[in-house]
Image (tube, rainbow, N blue to C red):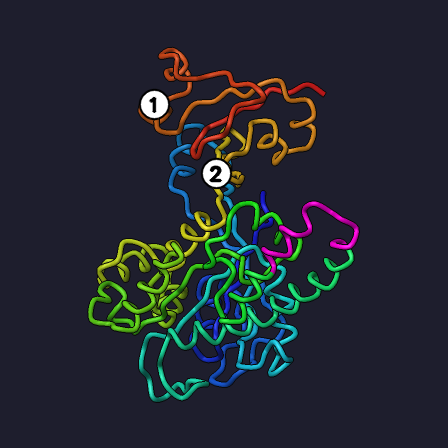
């Protein structure tokens, strides 16, 4: 895998979190109708679907295809009081601290056979419970920093008063159970908070778990509409899935899965939508390499320059980078071959300052 960015899947007990995780990773994490059956975080690595690789493999007669991959971590269900060690609170907080982004599963379906830890279905309350526990944990981090700041203020450090004002603002927000990412912080304020690694600063997307018949059309589901409205306020994405349906699809071969999706009125699985949203959330993109040995996707963060992108393949490529020979995937496919693209002047030589674009088909030139 060419990047180690992880998305943690969180949620209250019995919202369908582990069922969904099992379906998307086929990892077989235990899913049971009682809290805390997920204690250690299960990690699943899933391939990122990319039809471009099939096309390149055909064009270059590649022996194999290597897609990009993404890591999902299934984190123990959270309950009220987690920040004070209730349930598996300390483990939950430690595990969530390690991931790069959070996918929060909220239950938006009624089923009397599956108990809800709070006794009723209310996704906004569920989101609030998790936010409150993460805010309480963050308050501890901010308070500790405030204590250390007292000494800095005495030394006459010019930045200390500015940092103090920032921390006071954040502490007040957290006290009202407002996650730091929803506080409209300035870039300078975010810089002050960087080393605190606040849990409520992590980017979030919401996964609404609905009944099978509602995936294609959630207009009649008031729970989903409420989550969408809430997510819009922080510019977060909402993915609609049915964990039950995803687990059924996971058992099928590709052809049967495609038929199943068409019958349900869907064009792609919940997993595909989740991976795309996860990529966007983490600011990721892929560039492609293709040849007789393999056609492969490499994951980089948006804004990565050519030498650092080359370093994803091998550190020698970055160290001895000369230039990158690049053709955009669309141009390459339109021309039918790299030779034809070169004839039309569509194959470019780019230097060290070139910022990589999604879908660049690349050959790096280096000298070590």
Residue 145: x and y in percent read 70, 61
Residue behind mark 2:
286
| Residue closest to the eye, 154 or 340 | 154
Q: Is residue 270 above or below residue 156?
A: below
| Most frequent secondary structure within the magenta stretch | helix
Residue 249 location (% of width, % of height): 36, 64
Count of marks placed on residues: 2
Q: Nearer the viewer, residue 273 or 187?
A: 187
Q: Residue 3: where, in percent of width, then height?
A: 58, 45
Disc 2 is placed on an element classified as strand
Residue 260 vs 158, above or below: the answer is below
Residues drawn in magenta: 152-167
The residue located at (48%, 72%) in the rendering is 11
Tell which of 204 and 45 is nearer to you. Answer: 204
Quarter where residue 293 is shown = top right
| Magenta-drawn stretch contains 303 | no
Magenta highlight on residue 155? yes
Q: Which corner quadrant of the image does residue 142 belong to?
A: bottom right
At 38% from the left and 21% from the top, the residue drawn is 337
Residue at x-position 72% and y-position 58%: 149
Residue 332 drawn above or below residue 57: above
- Compare marks 2 and 1 and give the one earlier in the sequence: 2
Q: Residue at x 39, y 85 (%)?
A: 114
Q: Which mark is residue 290?
A: none
- Pointer 1 local density, CA inside 10 Å: few below 14, some 14–19, many at least 20: few
Q: Position of residue 44 (x, y in %)?
A: 55, 60
299 or 295: nearer the eye?
A: 299
In the structure shown, which secondary structural element does the residue marked by tag 1 occupy? loop
Badge 2 crowding class, 10 Å Cα cut-off, few under 14, some 14 to 19, many 20 or more, is many
Q: Is residue 99 left or right of residue 362?
A: right
Residue 360, relative to residue 134: is it above or below?
A: above
**Disc 1 marks which residue?**
336
């Amino acid at each position: 895998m060419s990047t180690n960015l992880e998305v943690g899947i969180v949620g209250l007990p019995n919202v369908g979190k582990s069922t969904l995780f099992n379906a998307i990773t086929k990892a077989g994490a235990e899913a049971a109708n009682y809290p805390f059956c997920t204690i250690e975080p299960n990690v699943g690595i899933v391939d990122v679907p990319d039809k471009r690789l099939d096309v390149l493999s055909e064009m270059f007669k590649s022996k194999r295809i290597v897609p990009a991959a993404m890591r999902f971590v299934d984190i123990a269900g959270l309950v009220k009081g987690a920040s004070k060690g209730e349930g598996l609170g300390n483990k939950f907080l430690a595990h969530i601290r390690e991931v790069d982004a959070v996918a929060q599963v909220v239950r938006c379906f009624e089923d009397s056979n599956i108990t809800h830890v709070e006794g009723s279905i209310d996704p906004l309350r569920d989101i609030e419970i998790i936010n409150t526990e993460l805010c309480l944990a963050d308050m501890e981090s901010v308070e500790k920093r405030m204590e250390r700041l007292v000494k800095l203020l005495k030394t006459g450090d010019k930045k200390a008063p500015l940092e103090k004002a920032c921390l006071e603002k954040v502490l007040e927000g957290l006290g009202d159970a407002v996650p730091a990412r929803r506080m409209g912080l300035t870039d300078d304020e975010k810089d002050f908070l960087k080393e605190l690694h606040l849990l409520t600063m992590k980017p979030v997307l919401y996964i609404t778990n609905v009944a099978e018949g509602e995936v294609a059309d959630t207009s009649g589901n008031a729970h989903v509409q409420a989550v969408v409205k809430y997510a819009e306020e922080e510019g977060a994405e909402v993915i609609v899935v049915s964990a039950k349906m995803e687990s059924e699809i996971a058992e099928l071969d590709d052809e049967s899965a495609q038929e199943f999706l068409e019958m349900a009125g869907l064009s792609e699985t919940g997993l595909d939508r989740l991976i795309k949203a996860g990529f966007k959330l983490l600011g990721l993109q892929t560039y492609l390499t293709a040849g007789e040995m393999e056609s492969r996707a490499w994951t980089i963060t948006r804004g990565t320059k050519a030498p650092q992108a080359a370093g994803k393949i091998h550190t020698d490529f970055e160290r001895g980078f000369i230039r990158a020979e690049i053709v955009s995937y669309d141009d390459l496919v339109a021309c039918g071959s790299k030779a034809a693209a070169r004839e039309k002047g569509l194959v470019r030589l780019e230097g060290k300052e070139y910022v990589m674009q999604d879908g660049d088909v690349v050959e790096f030139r280096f000298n070590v």
